[in-house]
Image: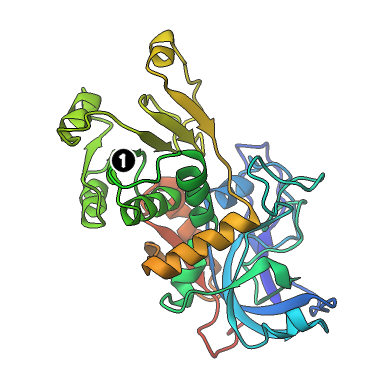
Amino acid sequence: MPTAIAIRKVDGKPGQVYYPLEHLQLPEPSPKDNDVVIRVTAAALNHRDLFIRQHLYPGTTFGVPLLADGCGVVTSTGTSPAAKSWLGKRVILNPGTGWKSAPEGPEDAKGYAILGGTKANPVGTLAESVCVDASEIEEAPAHLSGIEAAALLLTGLTAWRAFYTKSGNALPGRNILITGIGGGVALMALLFASAAGCNVFVTSGSEEKLKRAREMGAQGGVSYKAEGWEKKLLEQLPSDRKFLDAIIDGAGGDVAGGVIVSYGMTLGPQMPFLMGAVLKNIEVRGSTMGSRKEFADMVEFVKTKQLRPVVSRVVHGLDNIDGIDGLFEDMKKGSQFGKLVVEIAKDGETSKL
């Protein structure tokens, strides 16, 4: 029977509890006509997984494998020709279902169902194998390792929609500010914007993260802890374009200028929108993960531009719960620069559990 990792229920209030990890034994997959069974080789963490362990995420439940990001090899399929065509291929999973292509949001009346750890979707990628509909997978980019491919998915999709779909400024020469560099979405937004020919600037509380972002292609960056950081940022902008066209923001802090695309509120603030912002024609646009079409477009762009997600740290094996807990601790402390990944099995191997 395939093994997976989920959270175990213990007493505690949301926000105060921290659910421990436990192993699950799952039934052998029984694919329907258009299903594929994937032997998972790597799975990656997102902030939602930490929120699930703290019972701060909608629909948190027990007995459902964690994680939404996964790469693996198709080992068996249903009877349909579409499903059979995937046999033996290395694939990545669309991290959510119920949203095909509508620009405004999910078409499914039940809403968007993200993989991993909630009542919305029974599939999670922190498992030896998963069974999904063949329409929800893409071939993994050939230039990426399994670990890198797993690191691409949820954060790549979120960054793609925020930058390409929502900002309206995915154009050469535009000035893009990305806040909180070091997290997975922010780093993917940096890769996308740089590849699109934008002038990219970043903020962080860490000088080391600012340095690494410049090495990745950012034209400049400032510490948000510094007094008057906004003026320091403006001084770095090109002389012929001394304004920001868009801000890709995942923290909800004190930012202003251009189009502000907010994909997260890790600081949990109230964002005042004053008349001065109105007079500058500043817009605030909320952004979520993205549709199946946006996922395919994002993967194709990564293939074309040969982009590589940044991986912060990898631990090996589903039997290594202490190591996986350590990845969660990295996320708690905010010490990571890039994605945190569990290598479940190397290509060509089975899980060691």
* Residue 303, percent from left and from top: 44, 70
Q: Secondary structure at mark 1?
A: loop
**The N terminus is located in which quarter?**
bottom right
| Residue drawn at x 55%, y 39% as measured from the top left | 287
**Near-viewer residue (195 or 249):** 195
Res 120 seen here:
yes
* Residue 261, percent from left and from top: 47, 35
* Residue 321, percent from left and from top: 55, 67
**What residue would you read off at disc 1?**
174
With respect to residue 118, does 26 lie above or below?
A: below
| Residue drawn at x 53%, y 74% as measured from the top left | 140
| Residue drawn at x 17%, y 33% as measured from the top left | 240
**The C terminus is located in which quarter?**
bottom right
Q: Is residue 247 left or right of residue 209?
A: right
* Residue 22, percent from left and from top: 66, 64
User: Which amino acid type corresponds to the residue marked 1 in the rendered image?
Assistant: Arg
With respect to residue 245, does 199 lie above or below?
A: below
Q: Residue furthest bottom?
A: 348
The colour style of the image is: rainbow
Q: Residue furthest top?
A: 275
With respect to residue 27, does 237 lie above or below?
A: above
**Near-viewer residue (198 or 77):** 198
With respect to residue 199, does 317 lie above or below?
A: below
Tell me where residue 35 sits by quadrant.
Answer: bottom right
Res 151 seen here:
no
